[in-house]
Image (cartoon, coloured by chain):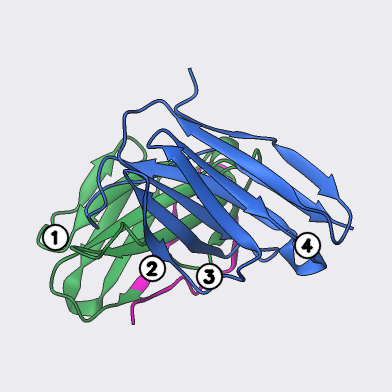
Amino acid sequence: AQKVTQAQTEISVVEKEDVTLDCVYETRDTTYYLFWYKQPPSGELVFLIRRNSFDEQNEISGRYSWNFQKSTSSFNFTITASQVVDSAVYFCALSEYGTSGSRLTFGEGTQLTVNP
Amino acid sequence: DTAVSQTPKYLVTQMGNDKSIKCEQNLGHDTMYWYKQDSKKFLKIMFSYNNKELIINETVPNRFSPKSPDKAHLNLHINSLELGDSAVYFCASSPMSRGSVSLYFGSGTQLSVL
């Protein structure tokens, strides 16, 4: 069975600090997909990124970057120069290719608080 | 225009009642889902429909019955509500049912059972 672990339940930083959210996953499949979603205080779930298991290139999007390492089954998310608006719960998720239905397995989430 | 919309946003009801949550997507997607987020923020899939056909049915009490009148709509009906049903219910959609696609979520329905 697949599993996603986000060991950091809560992180609190001061604005402009860099912060890394950890995500470790378990799966038996060789083809799978990893995701990050953001849930701000307003409650909606916002898609941030999708990465397939064959693409280990790191990705950068503005202040966001993602580090995918298959060797350690990790898909970490870094926010550079954090801002108060980054305060949210961040979820890492895993989906296996070919599964009947896109069954996302979510981690337990990391509550990030960015203080001014 | 909202891509995935669910109504109502808040639902407060008494134990034992029957209630429904409606979901509509205007993205032209084939697959729709219901996820439940509990009080600890944990998200878990409940159901998935692909072109009106049920393809995922997790271990959910049969008091919960999804209905998909067409591929743009997926409603969730809950009979005999219990305190433990209190949660946020998210509807989502995706272009196809394979694991490679990203899900687009609605804004959630906060259900409170008193």
User: Marks 3 and 2: CB-CB under 8 Å?
Assistant: no
Give the color of chain A as drawn.
green
- The magenta span reads A1-24
- A81, A23: nearer the viewer: A23
Residue position marked by numbered label 2 in the rendering: A23
- B48, B70: nearer the viewer: B70
Give the quarter of the figure containing the C terminus of chain B.
bottom right
Circle 1 chain? A
Residue position marked by numbered label 1 in the rendering: A56
- B53, A3: nearer the viewer: B53
Residue B5: image location, x then y, percent: 54, 31
> Residue at image x 77%, y 52%?
B18
Numbered tag placed on residue B80 in the rendering: 4
Q: Are marks 3 and 1 on the same chain?
A: yes
> Cα distance, mark 4 to mark 2?
38 Å
Q: Are marks 4 and 2 on the same chain?
A: no
Circle 3 chain? A
Q: Does dot 4 land on a helix, a strand or a loop? A: loop
- Confirm whether residue B107 shows in the render: no
> Residue at image x 19%, y 53%?
A58
> Cα distance, mark 1 to mark 2?
15 Å
Q: Amino acid at mark 2?
A: Cys
Of all residues, the one furthest to the left in this rendering is: A54
Of all residues, the one furthest to the top in this rendering is: B1
| Among numbered discs 1 and 2, the one appearing first in the sequence | 2
> Residue at image x 52%, y 38%?
B106
> Cα distance, mark 3 to mark 4?
37 Å
